[in-house]
Image (cartoon, helix red, strand yellow):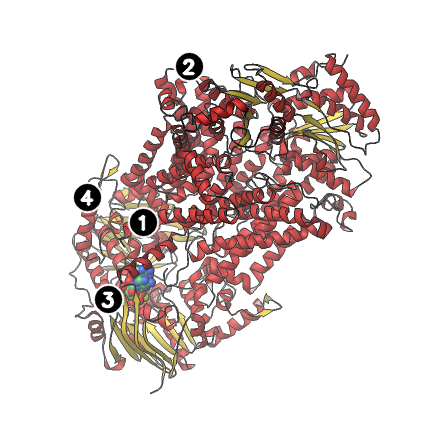
Amino acid sequence: MSKRLTNILTPIIAVLLGILVGTIIMLASGYDPAAAYIALWNGAFGDIYYIGEVIRQFTPYILAGLAVAFAFRVGLFNIGVEGQFIVGWTAAVWVGVAFELPRIIHLPLAILAAMIAGALWAYIPGLLKARFRVHEVIVTIMMNYIALHVTNYIIRNVLASKSGDKTDLVKETASLRSELLQSMTDYSRLHWGIILAIICCFIMWFLLEKTTRGFELRAVGFNQHAAQYAGMNVNRNIILSMLISGAFAGLAGAMEGLGTFGYAAVKGGFTGVGFEGIAIALLGANTALGVFFSAILFGILKVGSLNMPLEAGVPNELVNIIIALIVFFVASSYIIRVFLERFSKKGVK
Amino acid sequence: MSLMDILMIVVPSTLLWAAPLVFTALGGIFSERSGVVNIGLEGLMVIGAFSAIVFNLTFADTFGEATPWIAVLFAMVTGALFSVLHAVASITFRADHTVSGVAINLLATGLTLFLVKLIYDKGETGIISQPFSKIDIPVLKDIPFIGKILFQNTYWTSFVAIIAAVIVWYIIYKTPFGLRLRSVGEHPMAADTMGINVTKMRYLGVIISGAFGGIGGAVYAQAITSNFSHATISGQGFMALAAMIFGKWHPLGALGAGLFFGFAQSISIIGSSLPFLKEIPSVYLLIAPYVLTILALTGFIGRADAPKAVGTHYIKGTR
Amino acid sequence: MEYVIEMLNIRKEFGNFVANDNITLQLKKGEIHALLGENGAGKSTLMNVLFGLYQPDGGEIRVKGTPVKISNPNVANDLGIGMVHQHFMLVDTFTVTENIILGREITSAGKIDLKKAEQEVRQISERYGLSVDPQAKISDISVGMQQRVEILKTLYRGAEILIFDEPTAVLTPQEIKELIQIMKTLIKEGKSIILITHKLKEIMEVADRCTVIRKGKGIGTVNVSETNPNELASLMVGREVVFKTEKVEATPKHDVLEVKDLTVKDARGVTVVNGLNLTVRAGEIVGIAGIDGNGQSELIEAITGLRKAESGSIKVNGKELINLSPRTITESGVGHIPQDRHKHGLVLNFPIGENMVLQNYYQKPYSKNGVLNFHKIYEQAKKLIREFDVRTPSEYTLARALSGGNQQKAIIGREVDRDPDLLIAAQPTRGLDVGAIEFIHKRLIEQRDKGKAVLLVSFELDEIMNVSDRIAVIYEGKIVAIVNPKETDEQELGLLMAGSNRKEAGAHV
Amino acid sequence: GKADDNGGEKGGEKKDNFSVAMVTDVGGVDDKSFNQSAWEGLQNFGKENGLEKGKGGYDYIQSKSDADYATNLNTLVRQDFDLVYGIGFLMQAAVEEIAQQQKDAHFAIVDAEVQQPNVASILFKEQEAAFLAGVAAALTTKTNHIGFIGGMEIPVIERFESGFLAGVKAAKPEVQVDVQYAGAFDKAEVGQSIASKMYSSGADVIFHAAGATGNGLFKEASDRKAKAPDKDFWAIGVDRDQADMGPEIVLTSALKRVDVAVQDLATKAKDGNFPGGEIVLYGLQEDGVGLAPINDKVANKADIESAVKDWIEKIKSGDVKVPGTREELKSFSVK
Ligand SMILES: Nc1ncnc2c1ncn2[C@@H]1O[C@H](COP(=O)(O)OP(=O)(O)OP(=O)(O)O)[C@@H](O)[C@H]1O
Ligand SMILES: Nc1ncnc2c1ncn2[C@@H]1O[C@H](COP(=O)(O)OP(=O)(O)OP(=O)(O)O)[C@@H](O)[C@H]1O
Ligand SMILES: [Mg+2]
Ligand SMILES: [Mg+2]
C-alpha cells in the first residue's frame, strides 16, 4: 500500500472507528443509532439553514485550530487560545461599537483590534518563555482566567449599555454579517468570516512552508540549539510564534464578536472554543489543511448533534463521546497503520 | 478583622482548595516522571468526581458516615481504570501523549454526562447526603494558637493530601520503585539495559496517576460541590497540571504549589474584607491568584526542567 | 579451545535491510577481542544482539558451550554479560550509585539502602582501580568518569564478559591510557572483553584477536600479533587506506583570527576561558590540544557567538566580533563544524536538503523577498551531496535517518561550501571510521591550501599532530604553549596539556 | 424546515393543538434553577392541555454553548412550534434577531427585554422576593450580621441584592450585611469559601443568588451545623424552594416562579391573548415571586411569618416600592 494512501486512509478509518464505537455505546444503552445518525445528518445538512450554521460554527474553529497548531509547530503548547479568543472578541466589539467610521475602515480596524488584542495576550507567555524560560503551559492557563475576569470587568464597566451585562450590537459598518449570505442560507448566521478563515489557512501554510521566516520558526520548533547555531534569533521566533498564534485566536474571537453574535456579553465561564482548538489542531496534525478539515468535522458534529435529543431522543453528549473517540483513534493511528500494512501484505500474498 | 480572624479564615480555606489539586498533581507526577505527559488530569478528575457522587448517592444508606471515604476508594479504581485508555494509546499505540490526553478529557466529560442522563434521566445528579464534613481534628485542635488556625473548621481530606504528598515523595525518592520510575522517564533506554521493563513502569505511572486523579475529583465533588454536573470539574485538572509544573515535578513542590494556589484564591476571597484591599475593584482580587502565580514563576521559581524523556515513545532499538 | 561466548552465523534484519549477515564471533576466556568495521558495518547491532536488546533473525549464541536465548538484558546480565554502550546509558540526574544499582537495588524494609550500596560501589571501584565517587551526580562528572560508571554497572552485576562499544571515542588521551590500564586489570581478574573501536592503534596495543566485519558481513578473525594496522584497515574498508595525510608545507599569510585576553564563563558561572590569546593566520591550520574541560568548548562558543564573553577581544579579518550575534559572525566569514552534530549541527527533523542551507536560507538564490526557492535549495543540496559523498537515499530524506558519518560529511560540506575565511572544526571526526576520517582531513587541508584559516579542536592527539601546522596547547582557559607538530611528540604534548610548562615538558624528550 | 414535506401534516396538527417549546441555556432542565422551573411550567401547561412531549406538543432543547441559542431557537421555529421560549437573559440577542427574521413565529423570553411585536418579555420583580428574604433574615439573625453572595454583577442579581438589603433595612436597620460576588455561577468552591468567611466573621444568615456557586453555601452551613448543632448557620436559597439542600440549615428561599410565568404566558397565548411586544412583569401581585415556607426550626417562626405577611400586603398594595437597583436602594426608606 502506498504511503500516501495510508496517510489518507488512516484518519478516515479513525473517524469510522469513532462512529462504530459510538454506535456500540448507543446499542448497549438502548438508543437507536440509525435514528441518531439521521438526526445528526438532518441537523447538519437537513436544510440550507443548517448548512449555513455549520459553516458559521466551524469558522472560529478553523482559526482556533490554526492558533494552536501554529504554536505547536514552533514547539510551544498554547493552551491560552481560549483567553486570546475572549480578548479578541472583546476588542473587536469595542472597536465595533465605539467608532463611527466608513465600512472600509471600520471593519478592518475592528478585525485588526481583535488580532492585536489576541497577539498581545499571547505575547506575555511568549515573552516569559523567551526571557525567563517560564513554562508556557502554566502561564497560558493563568492568562485564560485573567482574560475571563478582565474582559467581564471591561464589558460590565466600560462597554455595556443600559442593561449592564452586554454591549450593544456592533455598528453595521463593523459587522461581518451579510444579508446576502443570510438570505442564501435562510437566515442562518453565516458571515464573511469564513473567507478570512480560509485565507488564514493559506497564510499559515505559506508562512510556515514557503518563507524564510517559516523556515526559522520550524527550525526553532525542532531544535533550538541548531537554530541558534544557524544564526536565528530563537527568542524572537518564540515570541513571534506566540504573537501569530494569538492573532489567529484573536481573529477567531472577532468571528464571534463581529459575526455570529455581534456583541460581547459578560461570560460565566469559558466558551470552550479555544479548547476545541486544541483537539482540532491535533486532529489536523498541526497542518493548515488538516486543521481546515478537522474543523469542518467538528462543526458538523457540533451543530448536527443539537438536533439529536429532539429528533431521536438521544442525548447529544454522545457526540462528544464520538468526537473524543475520533481524536483517540487518530492519535493511535500508528496501530491503524500497522493493521493497514498487515492487511495489504496479506492481500499481496 | 484581627490577624487571628484572618488566619482562621484563610488557612482552612487554603487547605480546602489545595487538597484536590494536590492529589491530582501527585497523580500527574507519577505519570510524567515515568515519561508520559498527562494533560488528561482534568478528565481523570471528572471521572473521579462522577464515580464518587454516583457511589455516594447509591450507597449512602449502606455505608453511612463511611460512604465518602469508600466513594473515594471507588473513584480511585475508576480513575485508574479510565487511565488505562491513556496508557494503551500513548504507550502501546504510540499516540502523541498530548493528543491522547486531550481525548481523555473530551471522553470523560462526554461519557459521564451521558451516563448521568442514562442513569438518572437528568442533566445532573442530585445532592449527596454523606459529603465530607468540616471537622476539628481531635487533640491537635487544642494546641494554643496553631490549633485554632490549622486544625479547626477543616477537612480530614486536606490532611490526607498533605500526608499523601509526603508518602509519594518517599516512594519516588526512597524506594526502588521510585528510582525505576524516574529512570524510565529520564532515560528509558538506560533503564531497559538495566533490565527494567519500561512499558510496565510507564503503565504503572499512568494508572497510578489515574488513581490519584480519581481521588482528586472525588475529594473535590464530595467536599465542595456535593453533586455532579457539567460544571463540577471546570479547569481544576489544568490547575493541578500547573501545580505539578510549578512544583517542578516534585511531590513536595506540588504540595507547595497546591497550597499556594489555595492561598491565593483565599486571599482573593477574603481580600474584600480587609481594610486596605476593600476599595480596589473586585476584578483585581479575582485575577490576583493567577497574576501571583505568573509573578512567582517568573520571579523566583524560574525554569523548570521536565523529566527528559517525557512525551517520547520508547521503541526498543531506536534512540 | 574454550570459548566463553560464541555467536554463530548471526543474522539481523531491520525491515528489508540486513544489518548483520552471517557473522560469527568467538570470544576466548581472558582475551580482549576487537571488533572492527566501518561506520554502519553492524558492530553495535551485533553487540546489541548479544546483550539481548535485539533478537537475532538467525544464528545461534552459545555461552560456555551451552546454546542460550538472550531475550532481554536481564538474561544477558544473568549470563554474566555486561555492556558499556557507545552512547552512555546513564541517567543524568541520578548519582553514580543510583545509576549503578538501578534495577538491582539493595533495600532494607522497602527503602533503598543507599549507604550500603555506596559502600559496595566503593569496594568494587577500588578493586578494579576505577576511583569513582559514589555520591557524585552524573551531570557533574567528566565523560571519562561516566564511562567508569558504565563499567562499574556491569561489574556490580557480576559480569564476566564485558562489551565495550567505542569506549575511547569520547576520551582524552590520558583517559584512554587509564582505560587501557583498567581493561588490563579486568583481564587479570579473569574477565573477557569484546572491544569495538575505530582506532587501529588501540587494537594493536591491547587486543589479542580481531574480528572484522564489512557492510554487515563477517570478513574474518585475525590474531593481532600476526597483523598490522594497514592490513586491518584494508580488511575493513576493502581497499588500501592512507594514514598519514599528505600535505605540503603551510604558507601562512595575514592574521585572520585574533583573540586577545578573552574571558568566558561556563553555564555554571565558572570562569573557564581566562585571558586567552590566540592567532590563526590565513593558510594555516592551528590545532588546539587540551584535556576536555579546559575551556575549548567555551572558547569556540564565544568565537561563534553562541556564548557571551565576559571581556577581551575577538577579531576576524580585523573586525571586532566579540558578543555579536551568531548571524553577524557567520556573515563575517566564520564557518563552524560543531562538536555535537545532533545538538547544534543539524535539525534532525528537516530533510537533509534544508539542512544544507541552514545558515544562508535567507540569502539569494535560496530565497527572494522572504520566500524560499526550494528548487535552488535542493539543487545546492544535490551538489553538496555529490561533492562530499554523503550517502543518503535522497536529498529529501530526513537528516535523522543518516548515519553519523554521513551527517558529519553533510555538515562539513555545508560549512566548507560557504567558503569562510575562518573555519572552526570541533572534533570533526569523533566516532568516524578511518575512511571517513581520511576524507575529512583532506577537506580541511584543502581549505588551508586555498588560503583559509582553520582552527581545529580535537582530543585525538594523532589528529592534532597529523593535520595541524601549529599546535596551541590549552590549559585552564589559557594557551600555555604553541608548538610545532614536527618538533614535538605525544608525550610532550600530554605533559603540556597536564599543566607542566614547556621546559619541564621538554626535559622529558 | 419550513419547506419540508410533512409541513402540511403539521399544519393540520396546529389546528388542534397549541404547541410550545423552549431553549435552555447550558444549564439544562435539571439545573435546580430557572431552566428546571421553566420546564416544569411547560410540563404543567402540557398536562393541562393534554399535550404530548415532542413535536406538536411541548418540548425543549438544551444548548451546549452560547453560540447554539440561535440555532436551537431556529430549529424550534422550523418545527412549527406555536410559541418558543428563550430561557435566560443570555438569549436576548438571539431572540431579538430571530424574531425579526421569523415574523410569523411567536417568542417569549425570560429575564430579558426584547422589543419586537412577536416577542413577549417575561421579567420578574426579584427584588420583591429578595425583600421578603431580607425581612426573614433580619428577624432571624441573633448576631445582627448577615451575608449576601451574588453570582455575577449583572442586573438580575443586582435586583436580588437591592431588594434583600432593603428588606433587612426595613425590618431591622441596625443589622450589618456583608455583600460579596463570586464572579461566577458555577464555582461552588468559591461560594463555600465566601460563606466560610462570612460565618467566621460572625454572620449567622446568608442569602445567595449565585446558581451553582450557592451550593457551596449550603455545604458550608451544613458542615458548620453538624459540628456545632446548637449554633445558628442559616442559608437562604434562591429561585426555587431549596429546602432539600439541607433541612437543618435552609431558612427559606426567595422564589422566582418561572414555572408560573411560563405556564401563564402560554395559556394567554393559547387563548389568543399573546402579549407580543410587551413586557410582562411578574411580581408578588402576579404570584410570580414569593417566599418559600420558613424552616420549622426557627424559634420565632410565627413572628417572621406575620411580618412577612404584612410586608407582602404593603408591597402588593403599592405602599412600598422595593428598589431594584443600588441607585434606588440609596433613596429607599420605609416611611
Ligand atoms: N533500529 C534500526 N533500524 C533500522 N536500521 C538500523 C537500526 N539500527 C541500525 N540500523 C542500520 O544497521 C546498520 C548497522 O548499524 P550499527 O549501529 O550496527 O553500525 P555500527 O557498525 O555500530 O556503526 P558505527 O561505527 O557508526 O557505530 C546501519 O546501516 C544502520 O543504518
Ligand atoms: N530506527 C532507525 N532507523 C534507521 N536507522 C537507524 C535507526 N536507528 C539508528 N539508525 C542508524 O544506525 C546507525 C548507527 O547509529 P549510531 O548512532 O551508532 O551512529 P554512528 O554513526 O555511530 O554515530 P555516532 O557514533 O556519532 O552517534 C546510524 O546510521 C543511524 O542513523
Ligand atoms: Mg556503533
Ligand atoms: Mg559510531
On the same chain, marks 2 and 4? The answer is no
Q: Which mark is residue C434?
A: 3
Q: Nearer the viewer, residue C249 or A324?
A: A324
On the same chain, marks 2 and 3? The answer is no
B19 to the left or right of C177: right
Residue C54, percent across and down? 37, 68
Which-is-in-front pick, marks 4 and 3? 4
Which-is-in-front pick, marks 4 and 1? 1
Which-is-in-front pick, marks 1 and 3? 1
Which quarter of the rendered picture does the N terminus of chain A lie within? bottom left
Query: The disc labelled 3 sits on which kind of residue?
Result: Val
Corner quadrant of residue A343 = bottom left
Q: Which mark is residue A100?
A: 2
- The residue identified by callout 1 is A7
- The residue identified by callout 4 is C376
Q: Are marks 4 and 1 in contact (CB under 8 Å)?
A: no
Inter-mark Cα distance, 4 to 1: 28 Å
Residue C101, percent across and down? 51, 68
Which residue: 59% across, 24% down?
A: D154
Which residue: 41% across, 79% down?
A: C191
**Residue C477 at least partly seen:** yes
